């Protein structure tokens, strides 16, 4: 078996921690910042010789995430006999979004409207899209959101995909997220 060490913020939901442990991985907890996670991952690689696999920037991860839309398009065609008009995808680090954007553009071209959504408290993708350049979270952003999986930011591999292939990005409030997840 392959061993895995997962660096997670201290305030990650218990259900996520339990899931990671159930797969046999070791969890290393750090402060609730992207910088803390990156620093700890770098330390682990340096001290153990482990191979780092970025959860959203690794091209293999991005490609794997795209299979979601391959299945979605296939099922819509099979069950409804139609093509998708629009798809809304959550965005944080951009791995899930980028893989699905590539798959959707490859399968449906410009016929499908690709829309990304992110919490208004974690709006780096929307701000980057509007500015036309990659932006990070504001230094004073404490990354507090119920959408804990979206606290990361776009990077050098995911940003160009979002910038060039997405139609629009919108944000949602914490209240809207909570209402939608009931």
Image: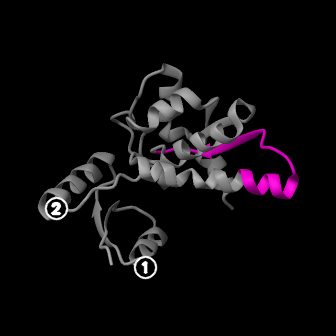
Asked which quadrant contains residue 115, the reply is top right
User: In the displayed structure, does residue 173 sit left or right of residue 38?
Assistant: right
Mark 1 residue crowding within 10 angstroms, few (<14) / some (14–19) / many (20+): few
- Any part of residue 114 in sight: yes
Is residue 146 visible in the rendered image? The answer is no
Please state if 143 lies on the left or on the right of 50 as rendered. Answer: right
Residue at position x 42%, y 76% in the image: 23
Which is nearer the eye, 119 or 47?
A: 47
**Place of residue 163 in the rendered image (x, y in percent of width and height, measured from the top left):** 52, 28
Q: On the rendered image, what quadrant is the N terminus found in?
A: bottom left
Magenta region: 73-92
Name which residue lies at 69% across and 62% down.
182
Percent across and percent down for residue 5 are 29, 67
Please identify the residue farthest to the left as the structure is shown.
47
Magenta segment includes 120 = no
Does 76 appear in magenta? yes
Residue 54 at x, y percent in the picture: 35, 52
* Secondary structure of residue under mark 2: loop
Element type at mark 1 = helix
Looking at the picture, tell me which residue is in the foreground, 7 or 78: 78
> Which residue position holds label 2?
49
Residue 22: mark in rendering: 1
Q: Nearer the viewer, mark 2 or mark 1?
A: 2
Q: Which quadrant of the view contains residue 26?
A: bottom left
């Amino acid at each position: 078996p392959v061993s895995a060490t997962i660096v997670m913020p201290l305030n990650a939901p218990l259900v996520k921690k339990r899931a990671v442990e159930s797969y046999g991985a070791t969890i290393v907890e750090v402060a609730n910042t992207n910088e803390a996670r990156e620093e700890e991952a770098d330390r682990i690689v340096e001290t153990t010789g482990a191979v780092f696999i970025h959860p959203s920037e690794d091209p293999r991860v991005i490609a794997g995430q795209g299979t979601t839309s391959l299945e979605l398009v296939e099922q819509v065609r099979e069950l409804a006999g139609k093509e998708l008009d629009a798809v809304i995808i959550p965005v944080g680090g951009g791995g899930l979004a980028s893989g699905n954007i590539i798959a959707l553009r490859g399968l449906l071209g410009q016929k499908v409207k690709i829309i990304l959504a992110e919490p208004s408290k974690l709006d780096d993708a929307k701000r980057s899209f509007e500015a036309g350049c990659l932006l990070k979270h504001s230094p004073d952003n404490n990354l507090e959101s119920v959408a804990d999986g979206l606290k990361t930011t776009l990077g050098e591999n995911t940003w160009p995909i979002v910038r060039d292939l997405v139609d629009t990005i919108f944000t949602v409030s914490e209240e809207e997220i909570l209402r939608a997840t009931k």
